[in-house]
Image (tube, rainbow, N blue to C red):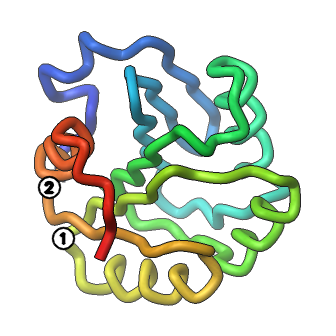
Amino acid sequence: MISIKETSLYSEILKEFNYPFGNIFIFDGFVVSEINRGVVFNWDNHGKLITEDISCFLGTNGNDIVYVSNRIHSYSLVASDWLKFFKHSYLLKSYLVVSNDKIKILNSMVESLFFNDKIKRFNSLYAAINFVRKGVLEVA
């Protein structure tokens, strides 16, 4: 797995948010997250801050945002906290998970139980970004 920082895409970033628990990269038309190893990611300590920062920067509730979770590190996610995200009237146009680790893929399947829409999974960051840029956002 490769970090966005190690790609030619890094020069296209509009805004980068760096937190003690990970990094968020805002591009034209999508957002990429990379959460640090060992983090137990939850709404109150992480998700709320990220969501507010992205919403403030882009001036949106997220309904036009494609969120790409680039899972280059092992971390835990409180999947039920997606309910808090939606409770606060936030939305996503589409949610993509990049991982080639079977455990991380299983985790995203649990996540899909709480996410209001389908989650599209990719084995590479480039495949996910190409998917977004082609405008193929119907997630099967």
Categorize mark 2 by other alpha carbons within 10 Å: few (<14), some (14-19), many (20+): some
What residue did someone put label 2 on? 124
* Percent of width and height locating residue 3: 26, 39
Specify few, some or many for label 1: CA neighbours under 10 Å numbering under 14, 14-19, or 20 or more.
some
Earlier along the polypeptide chain: callout 2 or callout 1? 1
Residue in the picture at 70% in, 21% down: 59
Quadrant for the N terminus in the image:
bottom left
Q: Say whether marks 2 and 1 touch (CB < 8 Å).
A: yes
Question: What's the distance in space between the residues labelled 2 and 1, CA to CA?
Answer: 7 Å
Residue at x 26% of width, y 19% of height: 10
Compare residues 86 and 47 and report the one nearer the observer.
86
User: On residue 100, which mark appears?
Assistant: 1
> Where does the C terminus fall, quadrant-wise?
bottom left
Q: In the displayed structure, does residue 110 sit left or right of residue 128?
A: right
Amino acid type of the residue that numbered disc 1 sits on in the rendered structure: Asn
The spot of residue 57 in percent (x, y) is 66, 18
